[in-house]
Amino acid sequence: DSLTRPGDLRGTPRYMAPEQAKGNPTDPRTDLFALGATLYHAATGTHAFAGATHTAVLDAVRHKHPPPAHERIPAVPPAVSA
């Protein structure tokens, strides 16, 4: 009980959905977002959201859109990026 407090963020920032990064309630879509971030990383070898600190990563998750995977790695089929 002493490891977390109400309002604490739980998760890995590079894979958090925007609502989770804001501290809002989560639902199954949160897991779908994390899966997409994982697949993006697997397809490109880079994270969809970058930053020098956890705060910068969470800001990127909330406010930026990564380029399609096929723009980073041309071998990724556009259908996979979609």
Image (tube, grey):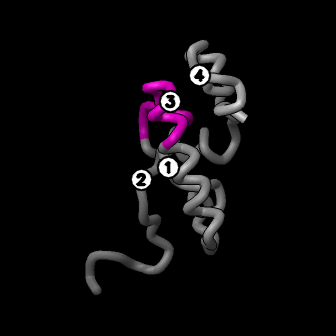
- The residue that mark 4 highlights is 76
Q: How many marks?
A: 4
What secondary structure is the stretch in magenta mostly built from?
A: loop
**Gap in Å between the C-alphas at discs 1 and 3?**
15 Å
Q: Quadrant of the C terminus?
A: top right
Q: Is residue 21 above or below residue 3?
A: above
**Nearest to viewer (mark 4 / mark 1):** 4
- The residue that mark 1 highlights is 15
**Which of the 4 quarters of the picture holds residue 81?**
top right
Q: Are marks 3 and 4 in contact (CB under 8 Å)?
A: yes
- The residue that mark 2 highlights is 12
Mark 2: which amino acid?
Answer: Thr
The label on residue 43 is: 3
**Gap in Å between the C-alphas at discs 2 and 3?**
19 Å
In terms of secondary structure, where does tag 4 sit?
A: loop
Residue 55: within the magenta?
no
Q: Position of residue 40 (x, y in %)?
A: 54, 35
**Gap in Å between the C-alphas at discs 4 and 1?**
20 Å
**Gap in Å between the C-alphas at discs 3 and 4?**
7 Å
Q: Report the front residue among 66 and 61.
A: 66
Mark 3: which amino acid?
Answer: Ala
Q: Which residues are magenta?
A: 39-53
Q: Earlier in the sequence, mark 2 or mark 3?
A: 2
Q: Position of residue 68 (x, y in %)?
A: 67, 27
Q: Earlier in the sequence, mark 4 or mark 2?
A: 2
Q: Position of residue 66 (x, y in %)?
A: 65, 31
Q: Are marks 4 and 1 in contact (CB under 8 Å)?
A: no
Q: Are marks 1 and 2 in contact (CB under 8 Å)?
A: yes
